[in-house]
């Protein structure tokens, strides 16, 4: 079930939050909790190693809070695909020009252009402007909300995860992410 899936900056932050041992689902709204749980479940139950595109990497590296920045770096370096892809600048600019006719977020347009070049199947985002404005404008990349993507997988209750947190990982003692 391995698919080529990329995540944008907000999805990356949601995933990092969910992976941190101190995460308490009770502190989030129901919708944010749903997105974070969905991202973690996609990662754990599908064995999906998300792609962090160059523009997403550039965005997270601008995080001012040193602890949050280090959390993002450690998750990206250890568990995700980042820094492995150099997009063609001319092709990127052509695609940005095409996408910017429908969406004003330059970095969003650039992220979608990079996803196209990397031949990503799905780009997960929780940015509704990005999603609504560009979801029908890529020939090959499907933009999806994390919870909608997770629900489309139809994994039955009781499915075993492909990856499990090591016993030293605080997630191994949590049950909020378990598919029961």
Image: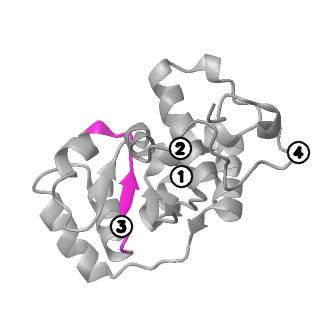
Circle 1 residue:
60
The secondary structure that dominates the magenta segment is loop
- Residue shown at 37% from the left, 42% from the top: 145
- Give the position of the C terminus as an image quadrant: top right
- Residue shown at 20% from the left, 63% from the top: 138
Circle 4 residue:
167
Q: Residues within 10 Å of mark 1 (few under 14, many from 20)?
A: many
Query: Dividing the picture into quarters, in which one does residue 120 lie?
Result: bottom left
In this view, the residue farthest toward the left is 101
- Pinpoint residue 31: horizontal percent, then vertical percent: 45, 24
In this image, 177 relative to 104: left or right? Answer: right
Disc 2 from disc 1: Cα separation: 17 Å
Circle 3 residue:
115
Circle 2 residue:
39
- Pinpoint residue 108: horizontal percent, then vertical percent: 31, 54
- Residue shown at 49% from the left, 29% from the top: 34
Mark 2 touching mark 1, by CB under 8 A? no
Q: Secondary structure at mark 1?
A: helix
Image disc number at residue 130? none
Q: Secondary structure at mark 4?
A: loop
Disc 3 from disc 4: Cα separation: 34 Å
């Amino acid at each position: 079930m391995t698919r080529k899936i990329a995540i944008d900056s907000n999805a990356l932050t949601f995933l990092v939050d969910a992976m941190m041992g101190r995460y308490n689902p009770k502190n989030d709204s129901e919708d944010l909790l749903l997105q974070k749980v969905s991202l973690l479940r996609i990662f754990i139950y599908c064995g999906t190693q998300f792609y962090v595109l160059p523009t997403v990497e550039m965005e997270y590296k601008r995080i001012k809070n040193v602890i949050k920045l280090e959390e993002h770096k450690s998750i990206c370096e250890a568990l995700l695909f980042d820094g492995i892809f150099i997009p063609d600048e001319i092709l990127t600019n052509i695609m940005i020009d095409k996408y910017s006719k429908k969406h004003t977020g330059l970095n969003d347009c650039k992220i979608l252009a990079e996803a196209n070049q990397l031949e990503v199947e799905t780009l997960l985002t929780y940015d509704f402007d990005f999603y609504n404005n560009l979801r029908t404008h890529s020939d090959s990349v499907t933009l999806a909300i994390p919870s909608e993507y997770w629900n489309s997988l139809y994994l039955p209750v009781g499915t075993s995860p492909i990856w499990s947190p090591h016993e030293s990982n605080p997630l191994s003692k949590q049950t909020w992410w378990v598919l029961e």
